Amino acid sequence: MTWNKEPFMYVQPSESSKNRYAPDSIKIGWWLLESGLPWHEMKHGCVKLMRLAYLLVLSCVAIHNVAADSLVPNSGFEDGLTGWQIFIPDESKDKNCHFDVVSTEPYSGLNCARLQSDDFARFGIGSAFIPVQAGEHYHVSVWIKADPTAQARPKTPGFVIRLYLRQGTADAAGGHLFISYGNAVSRNTPVVPESTTLPTTWTQIEAVIEIPPGVDSVGPALFSWWTQGAIYADDFSLDKVDASTAVTPLWQSPTTPPAVPTTK
C-alpha cells in the first residue's frame, strides 16, 4: 500500500450526517482530518488504528477457535456461567463454596472460572454429557492457577479433572476417570500428587484417555478436592483424536520392593 504525498480532496460533512450515519471508524477519520495535524502524522495515526484493528480480529479468531475445537460447551467461560452447574457434596455445604466467572487475568480470551471456598472443601462444576463410543481416544486439557493464599489439604488430590462415565442413565461400571495435577490418570479414585502445593501461574493439566467398554457418554467436570481459597480455570477442552494417538497410562500405585534378606 502506498501513500500519496498530497492529501486527498476533503469535503466538509455536516455535523448531523457525521453523528447520525457514520460508523465509529469513519468518525475517527473525520476527527483526524479536522484536527489540523500534518499529513505525515495523520498517516501515522491511521496505520496505528489499522494495526489495532488487526490485533482485535486475531484475538476474536483465537477465542472462537478455542471454543470451536472443544466438545465442552462454553469451555473458555466467555459466555459466563452458561452451560455450567456447581456441585457441592453434603460434607462441604457449610464451607461457603462458590463458583463464578471473572475477568481477572484469564489464560486466554476475556474470562475464566473461579472456584472458591472459605475452608477446605470438596466441590466441583460440571457441564453437559457428551456422547462417546468405547475405544475412542480423547485429549483432555484445562489450564489452572491458584491465588497465592490458596491451599490444598495435605495428602489430598487438590484439584482434578473428573470425567463422569455413564451408560444410558446410570453410572458406568468401574468408576469415573480422573486426571490429577501432574497429569496422572486414574479410575474411580483421584491420585494424590507428591506435592499438594497449588500452582500460582497458569499450569496445564492434560492427558489422552481411551473410553472404556460399557460407556456411551462422558460428563466433563472440574473439582476442587479439599482446597481452600480461590482456584481459576480456563480453556477446558475435550477433543477427539485419532485412535493411533498414544494413551496416557493409568497410574499405578508404587510398590515397596521386597526386603533383601541379610546374612551374618
Image (tube, rainbow, N blue to C red):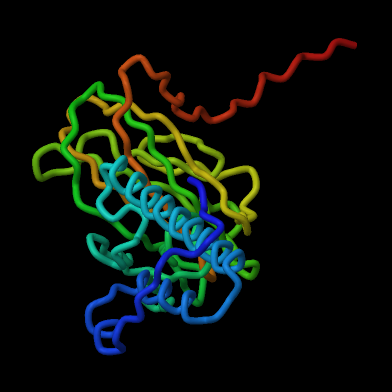
Q: Residue at x 49, y 64 (%)?
A: 7
Q: Residue furthest right?
A: 264
Q: Residue at x 37, y 52 (%)?
A: 63
Asked whether the viewer can see residue 238, the reply is yes
Q: How many marks?
A: 0
In this rendering, the answer to whether 14 lies above or below 245 is: below
Q: Residue furthest left?
A: 168
User: Residue 134: where, in percent of width, then height?
Assistant: 21, 25
Q: Residue at x 53, y 53 (%)?
A: 156
* Most foreground residue, 128 or 119: 128
User: Residue 163: where, in percent of width, then height?
Assistant: 31, 43
User: Residue 118: where, in percent of width, then height?
Assistant: 50, 77
In this rendering, the answer to whether 227 lies above or below 245 is: below
Q: Quadrant of the C terminus?
A: top right
244 left or right of 171?
A: right
User: Residue 85: where, in percent of width, then height?
Assistant: 26, 64
Q: Residue furthest bottom?
A: 16
36 left or right of 236?
A: right
Q: Residue furthest top?
A: 263
In this rendering, the answer to whether 155 lies above or below 22 is: above
* Most foreground residue, 29 or 235: 29
* Most foreground residue, 253 or 198: 198
Asked whether the viewer can see residue 232, the reply is no
* Most foreground residue, 74 or 257: 74
Quadrant in the picture for residue 140: top left
239 left or right of 37?
A: left
